[in-house]
Amino acid sequence: MAVTQKNILNKLYVVFVFITLFLIAIIFRLTTIQFADGEKYRNLSEQLTLRNDTIFANRGNVFSADGSLLATSMSQYEIRMDAVTVDAKVFENEIRNLSVELSTMLGNKASYWESKIRKARNNRNRYLFITKKLGYNDYMKIKSFPIFKLGMYKGGFIAEQSTVRAHPLGKVAERTIGYDDYRGGPGIEGAYRSYLKGKHGWRMKQKIAQGQWKPINDTNEKEPIDGKDIVTTIDINIQDIAHHSLLKQLEYYQAEHGCVVVMETKTGEIKAISNLGRSSQGKYYEKRNYAIYESHEPGSAFKVMSMVAALELGAIDTSTVVDTGEGRFKMHGRYINDSKRGGYGKISAARALEVSSNIGFARLIDENFYEQPDKFINSLKKMHLNNQIGLSIKGEGKPNIPSPGDEIWSKNALASIAYGYNLTLTPLQTLTFYNAIANNGEMIKPKFVKEIRAWNKNVQVFEKEVIDPQICSKETISKVQEILKNVVVRGTGQKLYDEHFSMAGKTGTARTEYGNSVEWQKDKKYISSFTGYFPAENPKYSCIVVIHKPDIKTGFYGADVSGPVFKDIAQKIYTSNYIINKIDNVAPNFASVKNSYDTYYSKSNKEFTSIPNVKGMAAMDAISLLENIGLTVNFQGEGKVNEQSINAGEKLVKGATIVLKLI
């Protein structure tokens, strides 16, 4: 018996010792965790339950030259609610009032919101979703609702702020304004991102449950600093004119795509740039920046460059006679054709440019430079035609003017280059050359941005940048200017002539995708263009219009397809710009422009008690009229008004919203 008791005691001693050692080990481990590794585990805990959330800075605004917003960052808010933190008495007293306010703002019945919030409180949901994509005004309004107005800790109000990029003027010049996202940062947005992006702030958040994170404080730990603003050279009025004139012509000719650029002659400032491509549904939109990136054979537009080079080298004069025969001429085993059936016969070099004779230019250049082609090619390159402009906007196409020895050089190369084939230029590169002709030989780099501003102060101003102060002699410039004026008066651009104002320029009609001549004959494709400036004397603006693959059943010559766009832009700028004061001090009378103005003027000066009929009016006129009589205007699309949501004749209610559908 004594032995048994002793064994039991021994076992108890062992257990006691084991438990004691185990407790010592636990105490040691706890002490180690608390003091030796405490900082490590506290940091780990915070990493798992706390985090810094980036608050993205608002990107700077992009403005037109007159201060209109082209791109801006707009704050939007996602609203959530901590349904648990609200005091029970406050909750019961105010839940009905909160539900009524939410119903009024967001829709659904008040009972829906009350049931939803009560259920969240019962389930201890501290991150209940209320709504998202609220603008700033609605955010300030919902923030003042019952319960929510008590703030985050007492009212459970949680607001998550983010920013979105908006283009207030819609699709106008969208590709040139650009983006800074997955699309690769084209346009001004991409080129000037370092100025626009600003500095991000941050806000501390705590993990509460199920992967949800709640802000710890009402304010941000570090406030974001907004980016700087960009002031562009774009003139909204000219941009609107160019965009809609191009769109109208593309639709009429069912063309694949096209572009327009309007440049201020003396400064190189781009006043308008529109690039429209056709979608699979047949609608046109800013698909690519064709004016900047798309290199193509310029066709007859290049004859001006050939003329300048030949005059500068002394190979010809404007009076030099060339025999164009009966409109078909064989050179180096290949036929060259003129557009006029029967040909032009013997004509001067100046007349060859006026009527755009392919044979005339092929013979003038080939016969003078066939033995020394480098002499002619180097003259073209001396005028920077083989160089990129060096734009800040990414994606500029590379020009290509081949030289003897290049892979694409052949015995026909020189003659082809003379009238605009076997080489490539972008529309903006072509316009830069023509602008130099208009500017008496001074070649200026096209400019899209005037200045960078921050907090209403200039940070950087971009001055005029001269590529070449004199691309050729004054004598050559004077001769070519006179010929380009005559192109409109009596040459291929004669259809564009108007006695009320002067223009100068050159038509261009180039074959495209003609590699397989048999297939091309079955499905002929052309690039139509017109490049020039106005007024012809002391030019204010230069302009290029390029339209790709018009329906040849309707027309394809540059004078027919692109020329009218050029003329329309010039007309409307004349009637809306001070340059009219320099043309005999008399504003020309364009019937279509006058009728549009008279329609708007007669309506805008009436006293309205009912909704006016704005169908058929230009969008800018309709919006101005409706806002002036006290309506809020929303619109969809571009162009003229096709539908209005409030019918004409209905009683006018100040502050009502009317939606216009444009086409």
Image (spheres, helix red, strand yellow):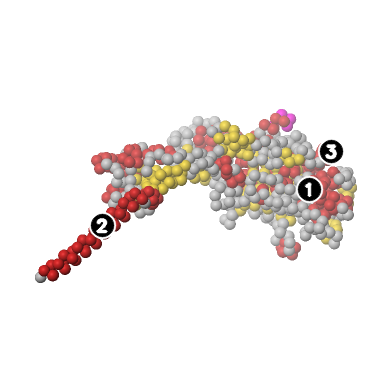
Q: Residues within 10 Å of mark 2 (few under 14, many from 20)?
A: few
Q: Indicate the position of residue 444 as horizontal and vertical percent values.
A: 72, 40
Q: Residue at x 54, y 49 (%)?
A: 181
**In-front residue for pair 662/318:** 318
Of the image marks 1 and 3, the number of the one nearer the N terminus: 1
Q: Is residue 223 visible?
A: yes
Which residue matches tag 3?
Answer: 475
Assess whether mark 2 and mark 3 are in contact (beta carbons under 8 angstroms). no
Q: Amino acid at mark 1?
A: Lys
Q: Amino acid at mark 3?
A: Glu
Give the overall secondary structure of the magenta segment.
loop
Q: Indicate the position of residue 147 as horizontal and vertical percent values.
A: 31, 40
- Secondary structure found at label 3: helix
Start-end of magenta stretch:
583-587
Q: Residue at x 44, y 41 (%)?
A: 135
Which residue matches tag 1?
Answer: 381
Residue 273 forms part of the magenta stretch: no
- Secondary structure found at label 1: helix
Q: Is residue 142 left or right of residue 333?
A: left
Q: Residues within 10 Å of mark 3 (few under 14, many from 20)?
A: few
Of the image marks 2 and 1, the number of the one nearer the N terminus: 2
Q: Quadrant of residue 653?
A: top left
Q: Mark 2 or mark 1: which is in front?
A: 2
Which residue matches tag 2?
Answer: 23
Q: Amino acid at mark 2?
A: Leu
Of the image marks 3 and 2, the number of the one nearer the N terminus: 2
**In-front residue for pair 646/415:** 415
